[in-house]
Each structure stands twice: as structure tokens, then as C-alpha cells.
Image (cartoon, grey):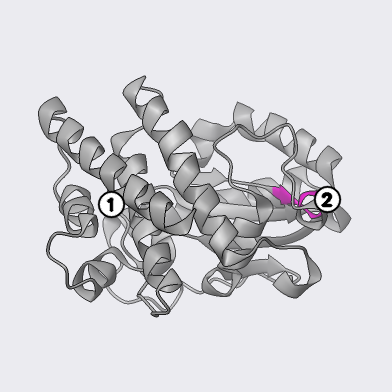
Amino acid sequence: MINAFWRNWKNKSSIEKKAILSINRVINFLLAHVPKDELISIYIKGSFITREMNENSDVDVVPILKDNDTLRKLKIVRDENKEMLRPSEILPISLTELKKNKNSKLHGKLKGRPDTFLRDLEHFKLIYGKKISKTDYPMRTLNKMFYNALTGIKNNTIPLYKKEKFGFSQLIKQIFWIAHFEQKMLGKNPPRTWKGLNKFIKDKEHIIHKAYYFRMHPTKNKKIRKKFINSSMKYVDSLLREYN
């Protein structure tokens, strides 16, 4: 049975209506291409849940699969049908990956470790199958996760952006999550929405306010983007000094 948690939403936007149609296509696609005993569950995460989608947003659909062989097969057919599935994006994880807390070689280097999914599991929506428990799998400490996220942005994300291999909107999204994680590390309970976190962090010089502005007012101006990237590097470096 499908948990269509969006069914009772009021005043759905055109973007949300398009996303819902896409989610239904993804569900049918997964049920058609993954044997029932190899599809453990399907989760949705991201801005669709918080109802903050914009024209550039994807719907992050995370199927939990039995093993890496199932993962490999799904990725092949997924890649052949990406355009049909948009704006949804299928981001599979296997139980093998969760048990080892190690990504299959099928994932690129920007893919977060499996425990980053587990870390925020209670904030995602289960729409099909069996609910998994984060206590059943190994996880890094939060301090280690935060440090790894910071080094990932510094050593991978920003350099790839400069080579035009990573989008600006994707980058500001990562800055959002770093800012959110920073507040968690300070012992606070920040909201998981753009608008909420922008209001929650009172320091007007904090980078979240710039990131939120660009989320709401996208720009292609290279000079303005470069200035934000430089600010992001300073922000990340300051956190790395603190949490190293």
C-alpha cells in the first residue's frame, strides 16, 4: 500500500502537482523493475516534504534495496529513463551499503556515506514497504559526520563548481545543510526549512541569509556567484578550524 501523505495537502502549487505525477511514475517504475522481495522500502526526502519546491527542485526518492546487485540493475534502467521520471530523482541505497556504511562503487564521489541518510531518517517520509531503523546499522559520530561534510564541500563540491561540473543551486543547498548541521552541533533544534532556518539564525552576517536570498532570487551573474563562493569557503574554513 502506498502512503500518499500529500493527498490531503491544500492549495497544491503547479510545481507540486507536477511533482506528484512524477512520484506516481517513479513508484510504478520501481514496482515494475525491482522484484518485490528485493524492494525493502521507498522513502521521500527534501523540499517536496517541506513544501518548498521551486522550478529547479528535484523530488528525492530513496528506494532501499536488498543488495548491491539489485542496486546495479536499478541504476542501469533508471539512467535509461531519467527524463521520463523527472522532476523525481531515484537515489537508491542497498542494505549492503547500510550494513557496511560504505557506498557501492556504482556511486560517484559526491555521494554521501549511507549513515547520512540514517542520520535524518525520522524527517523523511516512508511511502512504501518496511520502515527501517537507524539503530540496526553502524553510524559515525555526529562530529565526524560534520567534519566529513565540511571537507567534502571544500575538496569536492566547490572545486567541481569552479570547473562547471556542479550547479550553483546545488551548492547553496549544501550550504543550507551545513548551516543547519552547525546549529545542531551547537545543541540547538533548528527548523529544516529554508524560510525557517533563515529566521532561526539571528546573526545577520551568517551565510545562511545569503544562501536563502539566492534560493529565492536565483542569479546567473558570475561576479555575484564568485563572491558567494568566496564567502562559502571562508565559512567552511572557519568551521573546519573549530571541529578539526
Tag 2's secondary structure? helix
> What crowding class fits label 1: few (fewer than 14 Cα within 10 Å), some (14-19), or many (20 or more)?
some
Q: Tags 2 and 1 in contact by the CB under 8 Å rule? A: no
Residue 54: numbered disc: 1
Q: Position of residue 209 (x, y in %)?
A: 17, 58
Residue 86 visible in the shown view: no
Q: Is residue 96 magenta?
A: yes
Residue 96: numbered disc: 2
Report the amino acid beneath label 1: Asn
Q: Is 183 located above or below residue 228 in the figure?
A: below
Q: Position of residue 195 (x, y in %)?
A: 23, 68
Indicate which disc, 2 or 1, sits on the residue closer to the N terminus.
1
In terms of image quadrants, where is residue 182? bottom left
Report the amino acid beneath label 2: Thr
Q: Where are the magenta residues, as a range?
A: 93-97
Q: Is residue 61 left or right of residue 159?
A: right
Q: Is residue 240 magenta?
A: no
Residue at figure coordinates x 56%, y 49% from the top left:
25
